[in-house]
Amino acid sequence: MREIDVGLVSKTIEKLCIEANCALPCDVKKSILDFTETEVSPIAKQILKDIKENFEIAEKENMPICQDTGMALVFLKIGQDVHFVGGSLNDAVNEGVRKGYKKGYLRKSVVSDPIERINTNDNTPAMIYTEIVDGKNVEITVAPKGFGSENMSAVKMLKPSDSLEGVVNFVLETVEKAGANPCPPIVVGVGIGGTFDKVTLLSKKALIRPLNKRNPNPFYKNLEDELLLKINNLGIGPQGLGGKTTALCVNIETLPTHIAGLPCAVNINCHVTRHKTEVI
Amino acid sequence: MQKYINLPLTKDKVLALKAGDRVYLTGEIFTARDAAHKRLCESIEKGEKLPFDINNATIFFVGPTPAKEGQIIGSAGPTTSYRMDSYSPILLKHGLSGMIGKGDRSAAVVEAMKNFGGVYFAAIGGAGALISKCIKKSEVIAYSDLGTEAIRRLYVENMPLFVVIDSLGNNLYKTARKDFKESDF
Ligand code: SF4
Protein backbone atom coordinates (compact mmCIF):
# COMPACT_ATOMS: atom_id res chain seq x y z
CA MET A 1 0.00 0.00 0.00
CA ARG A 2 1.29 3.45 -0.90
CA GLU A 3 -0.21 6.54 0.64
CA ILE A 4 -0.63 9.57 -1.62
CA ASP A 5 -1.71 12.91 -0.26
CA VAL A 6 -4.54 14.35 -2.34
CA GLY A 7 -2.76 17.72 -2.14
CA LEU A 8 -0.23 16.31 -4.60
CA VAL A 9 -3.04 15.37 -6.97
CA SER A 10 -4.35 18.93 -6.71
CA LYS A 11 -0.98 20.53 -7.39
CA THR A 12 -0.32 18.27 -10.35
CA ILE A 13 -3.69 19.02 -11.91
CA GLU A 14 -3.25 22.76 -11.38
CA LYS A 15 0.00 22.64 -13.34
CA LEU A 16 -1.33 20.34 -16.08
CA CYS A 17 -4.36 22.60 -16.71
CA ILE A 18 -2.06 25.51 -17.53
CA GLU A 19 0.51 23.53 -19.52
CA ALA A 20 -2.10 21.68 -21.58
CA ASN A 21 -3.82 24.92 -22.54
CA CYS A 22 -0.69 26.79 -23.60
CA ALA A 23 1.48 24.19 -25.33
CA LEU A 24 0.21 21.82 -27.98
CA PRO A 25 1.49 18.21 -27.80
CA CYS A 26 4.47 17.56 -30.13
CA ASP A 27 2.61 14.94 -32.18
CA VAL A 28 -0.19 17.41 -32.96
CA LYS A 29 2.30 20.15 -33.90
CA LYS A 30 4.21 17.79 -36.17
CA SER A 31 1.05 16.61 -37.88
CA ILE A 32 -0.02 20.22 -38.62
CA LEU A 33 3.43 20.93 -40.13
CA ASP A 34 3.34 17.74 -42.23
CA PHE A 35 -0.07 18.57 -43.66
CA THR A 36 1.04 22.13 -44.44
CA GLU A 37 3.61 20.58 -46.79
CA THR A 38 1.13 18.35 -48.63
CA GLU A 39 -1.88 20.71 -48.74
CA VAL A 40 -2.74 21.79 -52.30
CA SER A 41 -5.09 24.75 -51.74
CA PRO A 42 -3.28 28.09 -51.30
CA ILE A 43 -5.92 29.42 -48.84
CA ALA A 44 -5.72 26.19 -46.84
CA LYS A 45 -1.93 26.37 -46.76
CA GLN A 46 -2.13 29.94 -45.47
CA ILE A 47 -4.59 28.90 -42.74
CA LEU A 48 -2.32 26.06 -41.63
CA LYS A 49 0.61 28.50 -41.46
CA ASP A 50 -1.51 30.88 -39.34
CA ILE A 51 -2.39 27.97 -37.07
CA LYS A 52 1.33 27.23 -36.66
CA GLU A 53 2.07 30.86 -35.86
CA ASN A 54 -0.75 30.77 -33.33
CA PHE A 55 0.56 27.78 -31.37
CA GLU A 56 4.07 29.24 -31.45
CA ILE A 57 2.89 32.56 -29.99
CA ALA A 58 0.88 30.70 -27.33
CA GLU A 59 3.82 28.56 -26.28
CA LYS A 60 6.29 31.43 -26.26
CA GLU A 61 4.07 33.82 -24.32
CA ASN A 62 2.48 31.15 -22.16
CA MET A 63 -1.00 32.16 -23.24
CA PRO A 64 -3.92 29.91 -24.17
CA ILE A 65 -3.72 28.49 -27.71
CA CYS A 66 -7.47 28.96 -28.04
CA GLN A 67 -9.86 31.16 -26.05
CA ASP A 68 -12.08 28.15 -25.42
CA THR A 69 -9.94 26.61 -22.73
CA GLY A 70 -12.58 23.95 -22.44
CA MET A 71 -14.14 21.85 -19.77
CA ALA A 72 -11.40 20.18 -17.79
CA LEU A 73 -11.50 16.45 -18.46
CA VAL A 74 -9.41 14.67 -15.85
CA PHE A 75 -8.46 11.04 -16.38
CA LEU A 76 -7.11 9.21 -13.35
CA LYS A 77 -5.54 5.78 -13.70
CA ILE A 78 -5.26 4.73 -10.08
CA GLY A 79 -3.02 1.86 -9.05
CA GLN A 80 -4.95 -0.56 -6.84
CA ASP A 81 -2.27 -0.36 -4.13
CA VAL A 82 -2.76 3.38 -3.66
CA HIS A 83 -4.50 4.81 -0.62
CA PHE A 84 -5.41 8.51 -0.85
CA VAL A 85 -5.02 10.52 2.33
CA GLY A 86 -5.56 14.13 3.32
CA GLY A 87 -9.11 14.61 2.08
CA SER A 88 -11.54 13.79 -0.69
CA LEU A 89 -10.06 12.90 -4.10
CA ASN A 90 -12.92 14.56 -6.00
CA ASP A 91 -12.52 17.79 -4.05
CA ALA A 92 -8.78 17.71 -4.69
CA VAL A 93 -9.27 17.35 -8.43
CA ASN A 94 -11.68 20.28 -8.51
CA GLU A 95 -9.37 22.36 -6.35
CA GLY A 96 -6.59 21.74 -8.88
CA VAL A 97 -8.82 22.82 -11.75
CA ARG A 98 -10.03 25.89 -9.85
CA LYS A 99 -6.49 27.04 -9.10
CA GLY A 100 -5.09 26.18 -12.52
CA TYR A 101 -7.80 28.08 -14.40
CA LYS A 102 -7.35 31.11 -12.15
CA LYS A 103 -3.56 31.16 -12.14
CA GLY A 104 -3.30 30.44 -15.87
CA TYR A 105 -5.79 33.18 -16.83
CA LEU A 106 -7.87 30.50 -18.54
CA ARG A 107 -11.49 31.03 -19.50
CA LYS A 108 -14.22 29.86 -17.14
CA SER A 109 -16.65 28.10 -19.41
CA VAL A 110 -18.72 25.91 -17.09
CA VAL A 111 -22.33 26.53 -16.03
CA SER A 112 -23.70 24.90 -12.88
CA ASP A 113 -26.91 23.66 -14.45
CA PRO A 114 -27.62 22.84 -18.10
CA ILE A 115 -30.96 24.69 -18.12
CA GLU A 116 -30.46 27.46 -15.59
CA ARG A 117 -26.99 28.21 -17.03
CA ILE A 118 -25.16 30.19 -14.35
CA ASN A 119 -21.39 30.32 -14.74
CA THR A 120 -19.56 28.70 -11.81
CA ASN A 121 -16.75 31.23 -12.43
CA ASP A 122 -13.95 28.78 -11.64
CA ASN A 123 -14.41 26.21 -14.42
CA THR A 124 -15.43 23.50 -11.96
CA PRO A 125 -16.63 20.88 -11.74
CA ALA A 126 -14.16 18.88 -13.78
CA MET A 127 -15.35 15.84 -15.67
CA ILE A 128 -13.57 13.04 -13.81
CA TYR A 129 -12.87 9.62 -15.32
CA THR A 130 -11.36 7.06 -12.97
CA GLU A 131 -9.94 3.68 -13.79
CA ILE A 132 -8.40 1.18 -11.39
CA VAL A 133 -5.20 -0.37 -12.72
CA ASP A 134 -2.35 -2.48 -11.33
CA GLY A 135 0.45 -0.93 -9.32
CA LYS A 136 0.99 1.90 -6.85
CA ASN A 137 1.14 4.96 -9.08
CA VAL A 138 -1.47 7.40 -10.31
CA GLU A 139 -1.41 8.55 -13.93
CA ILE A 140 -3.14 11.90 -14.34
CA THR A 141 -4.16 13.27 -17.71
CA VAL A 142 -5.78 16.66 -18.11
CA ALA A 143 -7.50 17.19 -21.46
CA PRO A 144 -9.24 20.57 -21.81
CA LYS A 145 -12.08 19.97 -24.27
CA GLY A 146 -13.58 22.73 -26.41
CA PHE A 147 -17.25 22.55 -27.24
CA GLY A 148 -17.16 23.81 -30.84
CA SER A 149 -16.01 20.30 -31.64
CA GLU A 150 -17.78 18.49 -28.78
CA ASN A 151 -21.12 19.76 -30.12
CA MET A 152 -20.42 18.12 -33.49
CA SER A 153 -19.92 14.66 -32.00
CA ALA A 154 -22.49 11.85 -32.34
CA VAL A 155 -23.37 8.35 -31.22
CA LYS A 156 -25.43 5.75 -33.09
CA MET A 157 -26.62 2.28 -32.20
CA LEU A 158 -26.03 0.55 -35.52
CA LYS A 159 -27.44 -2.89 -36.32
CA PRO A 160 -25.01 -5.80 -36.73
CA SER A 161 -26.17 -6.03 -40.36
CA ASP A 162 -25.01 -2.43 -40.94
CA SER A 163 -21.51 -3.95 -40.55
CA LEU A 164 -18.28 -2.16 -41.40
CA GLU A 165 -19.94 -0.11 -44.12
CA GLY A 166 -22.39 1.29 -41.58
CA VAL A 167 -19.51 2.38 -39.37
CA VAL A 168 -17.63 4.04 -42.23
CA ASN A 169 -20.74 5.88 -43.40
CA PHE A 170 -21.63 7.07 -39.91
CA VAL A 171 -18.13 8.49 -39.37
CA LEU A 172 -18.14 10.28 -42.75
CA GLU A 173 -21.68 11.56 -42.26
CA THR A 174 -20.76 13.02 -38.86
CA VAL A 175 -17.66 14.78 -40.22
CA GLU A 176 -19.56 16.08 -43.27
CA LYS A 177 -22.35 17.46 -41.08
CA ALA A 178 -19.82 19.11 -38.75
CA GLY A 179 -18.35 21.05 -41.69
CA ALA A 180 -16.49 24.17 -40.55
CA ASN A 181 -17.94 24.22 -37.02
CA PRO A 182 -15.32 22.13 -35.14
CA CYS A 183 -12.39 24.22 -36.43
CA PRO A 184 -10.87 21.80 -38.95
CA PRO A 185 -8.33 20.31 -39.31
CA ILE A 186 -9.88 18.00 -36.76
CA VAL A 187 -8.90 14.86 -34.89
CA VAL A 188 -11.54 12.13 -35.02
CA GLY A 189 -11.99 9.71 -32.14
CA VAL A 190 -14.05 6.65 -33.04
CA GLY A 191 -15.44 4.14 -30.56
CA ILE A 192 -16.89 0.84 -31.79
CA GLY A 193 -18.56 -1.79 -29.58
CA GLY A 194 -19.32 -2.01 -25.86
CA THR A 195 -22.58 -0.41 -24.73
CA PHE A 196 -24.35 2.91 -25.32
CA ASP A 197 -22.29 4.67 -22.64
CA LYS A 198 -18.98 2.80 -23.01
CA VAL A 199 -18.76 3.47 -26.72
CA THR A 200 -18.74 7.22 -26.17
CA LEU A 201 -16.02 6.83 -23.54
CA LEU A 202 -13.99 4.84 -26.09
CA SER A 203 -14.31 7.65 -28.62
CA LYS A 204 -13.16 10.14 -25.99
CA LYS A 205 -10.17 7.99 -25.02
CA ALA A 206 -9.30 7.70 -28.71
CA LEU A 207 -8.78 11.49 -28.69
CA ILE A 208 -6.04 11.36 -26.10
CA ARG A 209 -4.04 8.68 -27.91
CA PRO A 210 -1.03 10.32 -29.62
CA LEU A 211 -1.57 10.97 -33.33
CA ASN A 212 1.53 8.99 -34.27
CA LYS A 213 0.43 5.87 -32.41
CA ARG A 214 -1.79 3.60 -34.50
CA ASN A 215 -4.25 0.95 -33.30
CA PRO A 216 -2.20 -2.21 -32.59
CA ASN A 217 -4.72 -4.41 -34.42
CA PRO A 218 -3.79 -4.33 -38.15
CA PHE A 219 -7.46 -4.44 -39.19
CA TYR A 220 -8.30 -1.30 -37.21
CA LYS A 221 -5.05 0.39 -38.17
CA ASN A 222 -6.05 -0.02 -41.82
CA LEU A 223 -9.52 1.27 -41.04
CA GLU A 224 -7.99 4.35 -39.42
CA ASP A 225 -5.95 4.99 -42.57
CA GLU A 226 -8.91 4.39 -44.85
CA LEU A 227 -11.20 6.71 -42.88
CA LEU A 228 -8.57 9.47 -42.82
CA LEU A 229 -8.20 9.26 -46.58
CA LYS A 230 -11.95 9.32 -47.15
CA ILE A 231 -12.46 12.24 -44.75
CA ASN A 232 -9.74 14.23 -46.49
CA ASN A 233 -11.42 13.55 -49.83
CA LEU A 234 -14.60 15.31 -48.64
CA GLY A 235 -13.00 18.64 -49.54
CA ILE A 236 -14.03 20.49 -46.36
CA GLY A 237 -10.46 21.62 -45.68
CA PRO A 238 -9.00 23.80 -42.91
CA GLN A 239 -11.76 25.99 -41.42
CA GLY A 240 -14.18 24.60 -44.01
CA LEU A 241 -12.78 26.83 -46.73
CA GLY A 242 -11.83 23.95 -49.01
CA GLY A 243 -8.76 21.76 -49.17
CA LYS A 244 -7.29 18.35 -48.52
CA THR A 245 -6.63 18.76 -44.80
CA THR A 246 -9.94 18.17 -43.06
CA ALA A 247 -8.61 15.75 -40.45
CA LEU A 248 -5.12 15.22 -39.06
CA CYS A 249 -5.85 11.77 -37.72
CA VAL A 250 -8.49 9.12 -37.02
CA ASN A 251 -8.04 7.05 -33.85
CA ILE A 252 -10.22 3.99 -33.28
CA GLU A 253 -10.80 2.20 -30.00
CA THR A 254 -12.94 -0.94 -29.71
CA LEU A 255 -14.60 -3.22 -27.13
CA PRO A 256 -16.47 -6.53 -27.35
CA THR A 257 -20.23 -6.02 -27.69
CA HIS A 258 -23.62 -7.81 -27.60
CA ILE A 259 -24.84 -10.18 -30.36
CA ALA A 260 -27.64 -7.72 -31.15
CA GLY A 261 -25.65 -4.51 -31.37
CA LEU A 262 -23.00 -2.44 -33.10
CA PRO A 263 -22.62 0.79 -31.09
CA CYS A 264 -20.54 3.49 -32.75
CA ALA A 265 -19.49 6.90 -31.43
CA VAL A 266 -17.63 9.72 -33.11
CA ASN A 267 -16.02 12.29 -30.84
CA ILE A 268 -14.56 15.22 -32.74
CA ASN A 269 -11.70 17.35 -31.55
CA CYS A 270 -10.21 20.42 -33.20
CA HIS A 271 -6.64 21.23 -34.24
CA VAL A 272 -6.23 22.40 -30.65
CA THR A 273 -6.19 18.79 -29.40
CA ARG A 274 -4.79 19.31 -25.93
CA HIS A 275 -3.78 16.86 -23.26
CA LYS A 276 -0.95 16.51 -20.80
CA THR A 277 -0.08 13.55 -18.62
CA GLU A 278 1.97 13.09 -15.47
CA VAL A 279 2.54 10.06 -13.26
CA ILE A 280 2.74 10.53 -9.50
CA MET B 1 -9.01 39.65 -53.52
CA GLN B 2 -7.12 41.31 -50.65
CA LYS B 3 -8.90 44.30 -49.16
CA TYR B 4 -8.09 46.68 -46.32
CA ILE B 5 -11.34 47.91 -44.79
CA ASN B 6 -11.91 50.70 -42.27
CA LEU B 7 -14.93 50.46 -40.00
CA PRO B 8 -17.78 51.23 -39.65
CA LEU B 9 -19.11 49.00 -42.38
CA THR B 10 -21.40 51.37 -44.23
CA LYS B 11 -23.77 49.69 -46.66
CA ASP B 12 -21.66 50.65 -49.70
CA LYS B 13 -18.69 48.82 -48.17
CA VAL B 14 -20.88 45.81 -47.44
CA LEU B 15 -22.02 45.63 -51.06
CA ALA B 16 -18.44 45.77 -52.33
CA LEU B 17 -17.30 42.74 -50.32
CA LYS B 18 -17.42 39.38 -52.08
CA ALA B 19 -17.27 35.83 -50.77
CA GLY B 20 -13.63 34.72 -50.98
CA ASP B 21 -12.10 38.14 -50.27
CA ARG B 22 -9.25 38.20 -47.77
CA VAL B 23 -10.01 41.22 -45.60
CA TYR B 24 -7.94 43.15 -43.07
CA LEU B 25 -10.34 45.03 -40.82
CA THR B 26 -9.45 48.17 -38.85
CA GLY B 27 -11.66 50.05 -36.40
CA GLU B 28 -14.24 49.49 -33.68
CA ILE B 29 -16.11 46.21 -33.29
CA PHE B 30 -18.28 44.76 -30.51
CA THR B 31 -18.09 41.33 -28.91
CA ALA B 32 -21.17 39.23 -28.15
CA ARG B 33 -21.93 35.53 -27.72
CA ASP B 34 -25.07 33.52 -26.90
CA ALA B 35 -26.09 35.19 -23.63
CA ALA B 36 -25.42 38.76 -24.82
CA HIS B 37 -27.35 38.13 -28.04
CA LYS B 38 -30.30 36.95 -26.01
CA ARG B 39 -30.26 40.16 -23.96
CA LEU B 40 -29.83 42.41 -27.00
CA CYS B 41 -32.85 40.86 -28.67
CA GLU B 42 -34.91 41.07 -25.48
CA SER B 43 -34.06 44.79 -25.29
CA ILE B 44 -35.15 45.32 -28.87
CA GLU B 45 -38.41 43.55 -28.17
CA LYS B 46 -39.06 45.77 -25.16
CA GLY B 47 -38.13 48.87 -27.12
CA GLU B 48 -35.17 49.63 -24.84
CA LYS B 49 -32.01 51.44 -25.94
CA LEU B 50 -29.16 49.09 -26.88
CA PRO B 51 -25.78 49.46 -25.13
CA PHE B 52 -24.13 50.46 -28.43
CA ASP B 53 -25.24 51.91 -31.75
CA ILE B 54 -26.14 48.89 -33.84
CA ASN B 55 -26.37 50.87 -37.07
CA ASN B 56 -23.56 49.73 -39.42
CA ALA B 57 -21.94 47.93 -36.47
CA THR B 58 -19.87 44.75 -36.63
CA ILE B 59 -20.19 42.02 -33.99
CA PHE B 60 -17.43 39.51 -33.24
CA PHE B 61 -18.70 36.25 -31.74
CA VAL B 62 -16.04 35.74 -29.09
CA GLY B 63 -15.56 35.09 -25.40
CA PRO B 64 -11.90 35.89 -24.67
CA THR B 65 -9.71 34.47 -21.93
CA PRO B 66 -8.94 36.94 -19.09
CA ALA B 67 -6.15 39.44 -19.74
CA LYS B 68 -2.99 39.06 -17.68
CA GLU B 69 -1.34 42.05 -16.07
CA GLY B 70 -0.18 44.34 -18.90
CA GLN B 71 -2.16 42.55 -21.59
CA ILE B 72 -4.99 44.23 -23.53
CA ILE B 73 -6.96 41.01 -23.85
CA GLY B 74 -6.34 37.27 -23.58
CA SER B 75 -6.78 34.75 -26.40
CA ALA B 76 -9.67 35.84 -28.59
CA GLY B 77 -10.70 33.59 -31.47
CA PRO B 78 -14.20 33.17 -32.92
CA THR B 79 -16.86 30.89 -31.48
CA THR B 80 -19.22 28.80 -33.63
CA SER B 81 -21.77 31.11 -35.22
CA TYR B 82 -24.81 28.89 -35.73
CA ARG B 83 -25.73 29.35 -32.06
CA MET B 84 -26.42 33.01 -32.87
CA ASP B 85 -28.60 32.14 -35.89
CA SER B 86 -31.91 32.76 -34.16
CA TYR B 87 -30.79 36.24 -33.03
CA SER B 88 -28.78 37.60 -35.98
CA PRO B 89 -31.75 38.31 -38.31
CA ILE B 90 -33.29 40.60 -35.66
CA LEU B 91 -30.01 42.53 -35.28
CA LEU B 92 -29.51 42.74 -39.06
CA LYS B 93 -33.00 44.21 -39.36
CA HIS B 94 -32.01 46.89 -36.86
CA GLY B 95 -28.91 47.93 -38.77
CA LEU B 96 -26.11 45.43 -38.00
CA SER B 97 -23.73 45.18 -40.99
CA GLY B 98 -20.98 42.73 -40.12
CA MET B 99 -20.61 39.49 -38.20
CA ILE B 100 -17.35 37.69 -37.42
CA GLY B 101 -17.41 34.04 -36.39
CA LYS B 102 -16.77 30.56 -37.70
CA GLY B 103 -18.94 27.95 -39.37
CA ASP B 104 -21.96 28.10 -41.66
CA ARG B 105 -25.13 30.14 -41.03
CA SER B 106 -28.82 29.27 -41.44
CA ALA B 107 -30.89 30.12 -44.50
CA ALA B 108 -32.80 32.69 -42.41
CA VAL B 109 -29.57 34.55 -41.55
CA VAL B 110 -28.44 34.59 -45.19
CA GLU B 111 -31.87 35.84 -46.23
CA ALA B 112 -31.67 38.68 -43.68
CA MET B 113 -28.16 39.55 -44.90
CA LYS B 114 -29.51 39.85 -48.44
CA ASN B 115 -32.53 41.90 -47.37
CA PHE B 116 -30.82 44.33 -45.00
CA GLY B 117 -27.25 44.36 -46.34
CA GLY B 118 -25.00 42.25 -44.16
CA VAL B 119 -21.71 40.43 -44.54
CA TYR B 120 -20.35 37.42 -42.66
CA PHE B 121 -16.64 37.03 -42.04
CA ALA B 122 -14.74 33.98 -40.79
CA ALA B 123 -11.78 34.34 -38.48
CA ILE B 124 -9.56 31.31 -37.93
CA GLY B 125 -11.15 29.18 -35.23
CA GLY B 126 -8.61 28.16 -32.63
CA ALA B 127 -6.17 30.95 -33.47
CA GLY B 128 -7.01 32.95 -30.35
CA ALA B 129 -3.43 33.87 -29.46
CA LEU B 130 -2.70 35.12 -32.99
CA ILE B 131 -5.92 37.13 -33.28
CA SER B 132 -5.35 38.79 -29.89
CA LYS B 133 -2.30 40.50 -31.39
CA CYS B 134 -4.42 42.72 -33.64
CA ILE B 135 -6.67 43.88 -30.79
CA LYS B 136 -5.33 47.24 -29.63
CA LYS B 137 -8.06 48.31 -27.18
CA SER B 138 -10.69 46.45 -25.19
CA GLU B 139 -13.33 47.77 -22.83
CA VAL B 140 -16.37 46.08 -21.29
CA ILE B 141 -19.39 48.27 -22.13
CA ALA B 142 -22.35 46.15 -21.04
CA TYR B 143 -23.53 43.02 -19.22
CA SER B 144 -20.36 42.76 -17.13
CA ASP B 145 -22.14 40.16 -14.98
CA LEU B 146 -21.78 37.76 -17.91
CA GLY B 147 -18.00 37.56 -17.46
CA THR B 148 -16.40 36.31 -20.67
CA GLU B 149 -19.77 36.77 -22.40
CA ALA B 150 -20.02 40.50 -21.60
CA ILE B 151 -20.15 43.00 -24.47
CA ARG B 152 -16.78 44.60 -25.16
CA ARG B 153 -15.84 47.41 -27.48
CA LEU B 154 -12.63 46.43 -29.28
CA TYR B 155 -10.35 48.43 -31.50
CA VAL B 156 -8.74 46.12 -34.05
CA GLU B 157 -5.95 46.81 -36.50
CA ASN B 158 -5.72 44.75 -39.67
CA MET B 159 -7.69 41.85 -38.27
CA PRO B 160 -7.24 39.00 -40.80
CA LEU B 161 -10.56 37.58 -42.01
CA PHE B 162 -12.20 35.89 -44.96
CA VAL B 163 -15.54 36.99 -46.39
CA VAL B 164 -17.45 33.72 -46.34
CA ILE B 165 -21.03 34.84 -47.04
CA ASP B 166 -21.57 38.11 -48.90
CA SER B 167 -24.65 40.34 -49.15
CA LEU B 168 -25.79 38.53 -52.30
CA GLY B 169 -25.83 35.23 -50.43
CA ASN B 170 -22.73 33.74 -52.08
CA ASN B 171 -21.32 31.21 -49.62
CA LEU B 172 -17.71 30.08 -49.68
CA TYR B 173 -18.47 27.15 -47.35
CA LYS B 174 -20.75 25.76 -50.03
CA THR B 175 -18.61 26.55 -53.07
CA ALA B 176 -14.95 26.20 -51.99
CA ARG B 177 -14.99 22.56 -51.06
CA LYS B 178 -16.37 21.44 -54.42
CA ASP B 179 -12.92 21.99 -55.95
CA PHE B 180 -11.33 19.59 -53.50
CA LYS B 181 -14.03 17.00 -53.14
CA GLU B 182 -12.92 13.71 -54.66
CA SER B 183 -15.60 11.42 -53.43
CA ASP B 184 -18.98 11.17 -51.84
CA PHE B 185 -19.50 8.35 -49.46
S1 SF4 C 1 -13.36 23.84 -31.46
FE1 SF4 C 1 -11.29 23.86 -30.59
S2 SF4 C 1 -10.14 25.36 -31.78
FE2 SF4 C 1 -12.32 25.70 -32.14
S3 SF4 C 1 -12.89 27.28 -30.69
FE3 SF4 C 1 -13.35 25.30 -29.73
S4 SF4 C 1 -11.51 24.72 -28.59
FE4 SF4 C 1 -10.95 26.37 -29.97
Image (cartoon, rainbow, N blue to C red):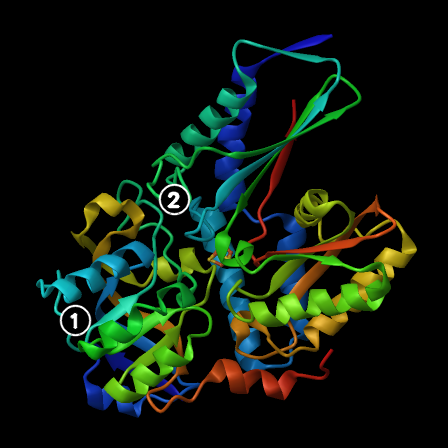
Residue drawn at the location 33% of the way across and 41% of the way down: A118
Q: Is residue A58 left or right of residue A24?
A: left
Q: Secondary structure at mark 1?
A: loop
Residue drawn at the location 52% of the way across and 70% of the way down: A180
Can residue A246 be seen?
no
Q: Secondary structure at mark 2?
A: loop
Label 2 in the same subunit as label 1: no
Residue drawn at the location 59% of the way across and 74% of the way down: A237
Q: Nearer the viewer, residue A206 or B83?
A: B83
Residue A142's x, y, as percent? 57, 37
Mark 1 Cα shell of 10 Å, populated few (<14), some (14-19), many (≥20): some
Residue A80's x, y, as percent? 75, 17
* Kind of residue at disc 2: Arg
Q: Residue tagged by mark 2?
A: A107
Q: Residue tagged by mark 1?
A: B54
Q: Nearer the viewer, residue B33 or B86?
A: B86
Q: Where B95 falls versus A140 (above or below)?
A: below
Q: Where B39 falls versus A243 (above or below)?
A: above
Quarter that holds the N terminus of chain A: top right
Q: Nearer the viewer, residue A216 or B132?
A: A216
Q: Is there a contact, CB below 8 Å, between mark 2 and mark 1?
A: no
**Which corner quadrant of the image does residue A152 belong to?**
bottom right
